[in-house]
């Protein structure tokens, strides 16, 4: 079974702090993704990466950056956290091969910015 | 207009009934289609892929209508454990771009 592990289930930070969310997958997947999920808005893609050191902006990258130094790890960084970044953050990974490759999600990190 | 649109529900359905959801997508270049299931406070999990000819997995049947740009999910003989939010998901191209677009989900509650 694919395992995607996010470092924290719940996190509380203060406005202005730099926040790191970590994600690790154990299936040697090329593609990794960061989403946020908010009521009424569904999942929205923040950033994704299709290879080590490669990154692509998703639909809502403002206020975020990412890092992929190793294939198995994809980090999401909030440079200066703001209250509107309070959300559920979900990491996902998928293999190469196109077609109907599904994305496998981690348990999510519920982040609160005070 | 949203790229993927779903009726948010909620659908409250008695146990044993048949329930169907539809989803429409706006980009005719979409190539791959999925239904994901998300339980309350849990991560989304793939329920099934949707193929052009339609496909069935036990009590679940998925259909794709490319001409009208909609996808459907049918659940027969619904169980209490089917209560969840069902997410319609599309992908624009098969190769080189693995980005998915999610609908906001349809909430289903099965009533005993």
Image: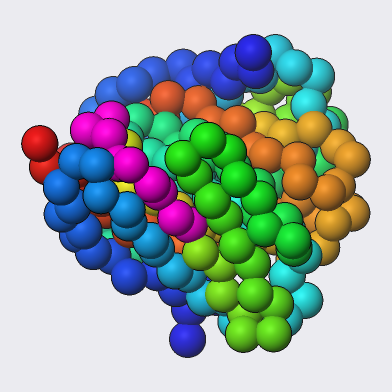
Left or right of B108 in this view: B23: right
Instruction: Note whether residue A64 is visible.
Output: no
Q: Residue A37: x percent and y percent? A: 38, 49
Where does the image place residue B27, in percent across and percent down from the top left?
67, 79
Residue pictured at 51% horizontal, 64% vertical: B72
Q: Which quadrant of the rendered structure holds the C terminus of chain B?
A: top left
Highlighted range, magenta: B73-81
- Hey, which quadrant is residue A28 in on the image? top right
Residue nearest the viewer, comparing A32 with B58: B58
Q: Is residue A9 magenta?
A: no
- Asked if the magenta segment contains residue B79, the reply would be yes
- Within the image, what quadrant is residue B9 found in? bottom left
Snapshot colouring = rainbow
Is A58 placed left or right of B108 in the picture? right
In terms of depth relative to the viewer, which is nearer, A108 or A66?
Answer: A108
Q: Residue at x 83, y 49 (%)?
A: A99
Q: Residue furthest left?
A: B112
Residue at the image point whose x is 65% and y is 18% from the top: A2
Instruction: Left or right? Give the position of A40 relative to B109.
Output: right
Q: Can residue B16 be seen from the camera position used here? A: yes
Among the 4 quarters of the image, the one containing residue A58: bottom right
Question: In the rendering, at what x and y percent does residue B83 appear?
Answer: 26, 39
- Report the number of discs: 0
Q: Is residue B8 above or below residue B5?
A: above
Residue A42's spot in the image, x, y percent? 39, 57
Placement of A106 over or under B67, stated as above or below: above
């Amino acid at each position: 079974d694919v395992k995607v592990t996010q470092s924290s289930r719940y996190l509380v930070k203060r406005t202005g702090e730099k926040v790191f969310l970590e994600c690790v997958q154990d299936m040697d997947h090329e593609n990794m993704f960061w989403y946020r999920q908010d009521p009424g808005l569904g999942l929205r893609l923040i950033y994704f990466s299709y290879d080590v050191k490669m990154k692509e902006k998703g639909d809502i990258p403002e206020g975020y950056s990412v890092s992929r130094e190793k294939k198995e790890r994809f980090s999401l960084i909030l440079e200066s956290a703001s209250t509107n970044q309070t959300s559920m953050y979900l990491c996902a990974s998928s293999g190469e091969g196109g077609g109907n490759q599904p994305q496998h999600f981690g348990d999510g990190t519920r982040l609160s910015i005070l | 207009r949203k790229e993927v649109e779903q009726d948010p529900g909620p659908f409250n359905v008695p146990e044993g009934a048949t329930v169907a959801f539809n989803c429409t997508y706006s980009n005719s270049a979409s190539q791959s289609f999925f239904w994901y299931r998300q339980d309350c406070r849990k991560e989304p999990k793939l329920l099934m892929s949707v193929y052009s000819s339609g496909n069935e997995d036990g009590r679940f049947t998925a259909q794709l209508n490319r001409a009208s740009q909609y996808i459907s999910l049918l659940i027969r003989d619904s169980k209490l454990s089917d209560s969840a939010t069902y997410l319609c998901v599309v992908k624009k191209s098969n190769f080189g771009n693995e980005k998915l677009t999610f609908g906001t989900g349809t909430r289903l509650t099965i009533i005993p």
